[in-house]
Image: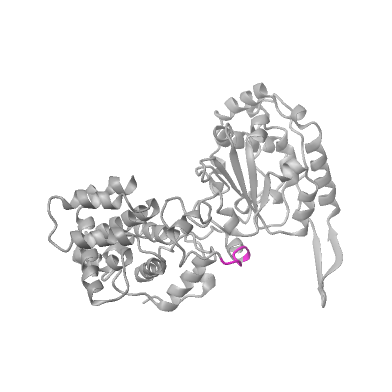
């Protein structure tokens, strides 16, 4: 049995964040220099001095925060300059499409291997729930504010950005900006702002900011125009982030898991219909707890061979920690190092908490009639008709459970869990009634149904996905 861990350990993401780069560049603290012949100059790039982190002094006395709050003068000046320039006939100062296309073609000839070490800084492989492209910028992986950019370095960075982003900005897209610091790299943004043509600005659906809500950030956003503010969402609760972004798409940093999960959003004990409407759900149509469990098994093949899997229980205290963490939106996946019995116990607890069985009362009674006798040639077609009558979310969950049970049963020589055993485990979770002597015999029929589905899973995939 694995040793019980603390709640803080529990909510750590599976993939721990790599060590922050001590020095972006050991010698110069700046991007690599390019020789003059390497860069053409179709437009001028303004040189901007880098923005050092502003100083904010919070004095706490007996009465809390005092009225003395000092904001770095440099940050104040730069913020106002950025906002002013952004409002100054913006479409007249943006780069034209013809010039942009020249730079875009030129970017395709460049070698950007130097940026490989910051792969987690800019991620573009995901979409939101409506298939809008997501541009995820993790400033903690590339400390933009801490380094000076000269003219050529800005050009190089710009070429890298347009080379990677152009294909995603021809339609509505979303930017997710993650930064554990309390200020934005305004000078760098200002240097790059005019170099993106109108499609970057017009097609931006909105920006999600996952940052500490500090006075500096409030001050910056308070100066923006109403139109710009309407496109900025400052995340204060991770549940709000998941309204548009499926759980598991973004690796949530530890500081955000701690800071923005204080409000409960229970998923244990709610109906499948309500679970399907909850923000706190993944990319599939099945409940998050079950999705995380299936992902755990998919990435941890050894778990399939664990003896007594799904039959044996995990440490109750540890299981309860997971239940609480799920109800507070603190879990995006099970750690691969987790005890398989813990994972399956959490999954079974979730199924047990459902207020209604997967099979409705009428369907359950029909199943009992069918399996009160030995299955025949008509059994498969009869079951298909019945399965089509249960709600879609119920069918999807049923298929997910049957498929997982099927995979586990293929390893019965190691885990001692054959198809009959798996039917006995899952049968009570898909249909139940008030306890009676009659209900005991009915449970055996439902168990037989689940075993039958495992054995003939290929015949039911289409109907369950219909």
Q: In the orientation shown, which residue stands out farthest toward the top?
A: 98
- Let me know if residue 390 is in the magenta part: no
Residue at the (71%, 36%) spot, across then down: 193
Q: In the orientation shown, which residue stands out farthest toward the front?
A: 362
Residue 286 placement, left or right of 330: left
What is the quadrant of the N terminus in the image?
Answer: bottom left
With respect to residue 160, does 148 lie above or below?
below
Residue at the (25%, 57%) spot, across then down: 406
Instruction: Say which quarter of the image contains residue 36.
Output: top right
268 or 128: nearer the viewer: 268
Residue at the (80%, 61%) spot, across then down: 56
274 or 216: nearer the viewer: 274
Residue at the (78%, 45%) spot, across then down: 224
The image position of residue 183, as x and y in percent, is 73, 53
The image position of residue 44, as x and y in percent, is 74, 28
For the question of whether residue 410 can be seen, the reply is yes
What is the quadrant of the C terminus in the image?
Answer: top left
User: What secondary structure characterizes most of the magenta part?
Assistant: loop
The image position of residue 189, as x and y in percent, is 71, 42
With respect to residue 300, does 136 lie above or below?
above
Instruction: Tell me which segment is drawn in magenta.
Output: 259-264
Residue 368 placement, left or right of 48: left
* Colour style of the rendered protein structure: one colour
């Amino acid at each position: 049995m694995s040793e019980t861990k603390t709640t803080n350990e529990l909510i750590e993401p599976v993939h721990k964040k790599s060590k922050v780069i001590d020095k972006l560049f050991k010698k110069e603290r700046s991007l690599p220099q390019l020789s003059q012949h390497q860069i053409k100059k179709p437009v001028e790039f303004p040189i901007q001095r880098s923005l050092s982190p502003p100083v904010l002094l919070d004095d706490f006395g007996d009465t809390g925060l005092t009225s003395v709050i000092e904001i770095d003068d440099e940050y104040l000046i730069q913020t106002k300059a950025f906002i002013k320039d952004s409002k100054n006939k913006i479409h007249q100062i943006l780069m034209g499409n013809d010039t942009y296309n020249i730079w875009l073609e030129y970017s395709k000839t460049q070698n950007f291997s130097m940026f490989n070490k910051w792969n987690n800084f800019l991620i573009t492989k995901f979409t939101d729930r409506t298939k809008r492209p997501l541009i995820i910028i993790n400033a903690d992986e590339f400390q933009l504010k801490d380094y000076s950019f000269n003219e050529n370095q800005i050009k190089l960075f710009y070429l890298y950005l347009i080379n990677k982003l152009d294909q995603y900005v021809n339609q509505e897209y979303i930017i997710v900006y993650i930064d554990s610091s309390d200020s934005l790299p305004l000078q760098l943004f200002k240097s790059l702002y005019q170099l993106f043509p109108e499609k970057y600005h017009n097609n931006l659906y909105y920006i999600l900011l996952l940052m500490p809500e500090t006075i500096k950030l409030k001050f910056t956003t308070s100066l923006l125009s109403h139109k710009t503010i309407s496109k900025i969402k400052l995340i204060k609760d991770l549940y709000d982030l998941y309204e548009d972004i499926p759980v598991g798409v973004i690796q949530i940093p530890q500081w955000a898991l701690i800071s923005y999960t204080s409000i409960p959003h229970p998923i244990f004990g709610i109906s499948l219909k309500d679970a399907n409407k909850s923000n706190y759900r993944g990319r599939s149509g099945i409940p998050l707890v079950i999705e995380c469990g299936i992902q755990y098994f998919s990435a941890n093949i050894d778990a399939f061979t664990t003896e007594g899997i799904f039959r044996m229980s995990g440490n109750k205290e540890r299981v309860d920690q997971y239940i609480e963490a799920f109800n507070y939106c603190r879990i995006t996946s099970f750690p691969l190092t987790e005890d398989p019995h813990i994972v399956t116990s959490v999954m079974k607890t979730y199924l047990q908490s459902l207020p209604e069985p997967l099979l409705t009362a009428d369907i359950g009674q029909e199943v009992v009639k069918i399996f009160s006798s030995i299955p025949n040639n008509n059994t498969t077609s009869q079951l298909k008709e019945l399965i089509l009558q249960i709600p879609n979310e119920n069918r999807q969950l049923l298929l997910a459970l049957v498929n997982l049970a099927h995979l586990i049963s293929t390893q019965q020589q190691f885990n001692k869990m054959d198809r009959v055993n798996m039917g006995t485990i899952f049968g009570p979770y898909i249909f139940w009634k008030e306890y009676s002597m009659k209900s005991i015999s009915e449970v055996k029929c439902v168990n037989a149904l689940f075993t039958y589905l495992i054995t003939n899973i290929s015949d039911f995939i289409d109907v369950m996905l219909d």
